[in-house]
Image (cartoon, grey):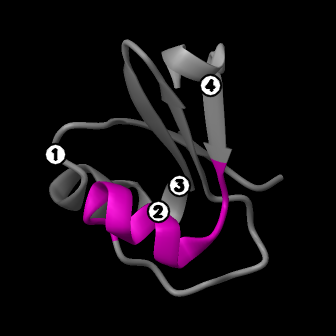
Amino acid sequence: MAAESIEAAYVTQPVSIAYLTGFHAEPIERLMALVVRANGATLIVPAIEREAAVRSALDVGVVSWRDG
């Protein structure tokens, strides 16, 4: 990414998120994304998926959000 002057990548395809993090989730209508930067990655998931994401995506920070 640095060679191309790209500061971050924003990944939303569930299959790509699974490949990059090890976290497998069923595609749903709610936001799920992976933000990859040179200093690390953050997985953004619905609150209902938080525990599974923390268990599966070991080298990634996890941030969850709640509907409503």
The numbered mark at residue 8 is: 4
Q: Which amino acid does label 1 sit on?
A: Leu
Measuring from the top left, give residue 67's x and y in whole percent.
Answer: 76, 56
Q: Distance between the residues labelled 1 and 3?
A: 17 Å
Q: What element carries label 3?
A: helix
Say which of marks 2 and 1 sits in front.
2
Q: Magenta segment: does it hold 24?
A: no
**Alpha-carbon span between mark 1 and mark 4:** 20 Å
In front here: 24 or 39?
39
Which numbered disc, 2 or 3, marks the residue that appears first in the sequence? 2
- Look at the numbered disc 1 and give the secondary structure of its residue: loop
Q: Is mark 2 on a helix, strand or loop?
A: helix
At a point 42% along the width and 16% down the height, the residue shown is: 38
Closer to the eye: label 1 or 3: 1
| Residue marked by disc 1 | 58
Which residue corresponds to the image point at 37% horizontal and 12% vertical from the top-left? 39
Frontmost of labels 1 and 4 is 4
Q: Which of marks 1 and 3 is nearer the N terminus?
A: 3
Q: What residue type is labelled 2?
A: Ile
At horizontal 52% and vertical 26% (from top left) the residue drawn is 1
Badge 4 element: strand
Give the magenta-colored segment's residue range: 11-23
